[in-house]
Amino acid sequence: MSRIASPLPQPESQTTAVEVDRVVNACGGISIAGRQISIGLPLAGQRVRIRVDGILLHVIDEAGQLRRTLRCPLPPTALGRIRDARPASAVPPPAAIPEVERVVSITGSIQVAGQRIQVGKVHARKLVSVALDEHTVTVYDADTPIAAVARRSTTDLNRTKAKHQITARFQP
């Protein structure tokens, strides 16, 4: 029995990845192959390296850290039309997990990246460290974890230091 070739085009087993350098506009977007792609307002004004790899689009900052991975809106046939494209290098590791400091309120809560987290009144007025992962927010008192909650917000960090100073009450 002989095999008949399929009339449909066969997918490429090895897709070629390309890279381009772009400056992010004030609205957090870039232009690739005649299409506007939003990559995030926190990167506005920065020069980034964009790696287009099949259906993924990797955003790499000037320090060489992977900042975002998005679904690529370009069809595979558009890779040849990208201006200033070059063969891609390896994908860098993701950026380090950001750590921030917060002072626990008198009600026992903190707010990080637009998400309010209840850590308990026993920790009121303490300086705590918060580690933000992609899916979790972990609160530490010194090196001891206090709370770990699911991350519900997609807001980026605005501040990394504690806003209020801790004042001790001295009695003469």
Image (tube, helix red, strand yellow):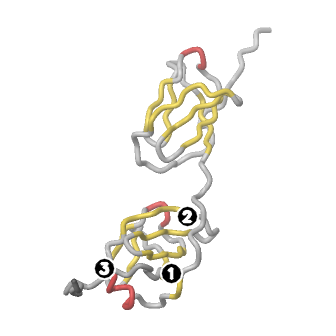
What is the count of numbered marks? 3
Tell me the element at label 2: strand
Which numbered circle lies on residue 75? 3
Residue at 50%, 71% (x, y): give it: 45
Rendered position, 171 above or below 155: above
Give neighbour class at mark 2: few <14, some 14-19, many 20+ (Cα, 10 Å): many
The amino acid sitting under disc 2 is: Leu
The amino acid sitting under disc 3 is: Pro
Q: Quadrant of residue 9?
A: bottom left
Residue at 72%, 19% (x, y): give it: 168
The amino acid sitting under disc 1 is: Glu
48 left or right, relative to 54: right
In primary-sequence order, the first of circles 2 and 3 is 2
Give neighbour class at mark 1: few <14, some 14-19, many 20+ (Cα, 10 Å): many
Do the CB atoms of the residues marked 3 and 1 lie less than 8 Å apart?
A: no
Considering depth in this image, is 33 or 124 the residue closer to the camera?
Answer: 33
Question: In the rendering, at what x and y percent does residue 131 appear?
Answer: 59, 40
106 left or right, relative to 145: left
Which numbered circle lies on residue 19? 1
Question: In the rendering, at what x and y percent does residue 56 appear?
Answer: 41, 69
Considering depth in this image, is 56 or 131 the residue closer to the camera?
Answer: 56
In primary-sequence order, the first of circles 3 and 1 is 1
* Marks 3 and 1, how far apart at CA: 15 Å
141 left or right, relative to 14: right
Give neighbour class at mark 3: few <14, some 14-19, many 20+ (Cα, 10 Å): few
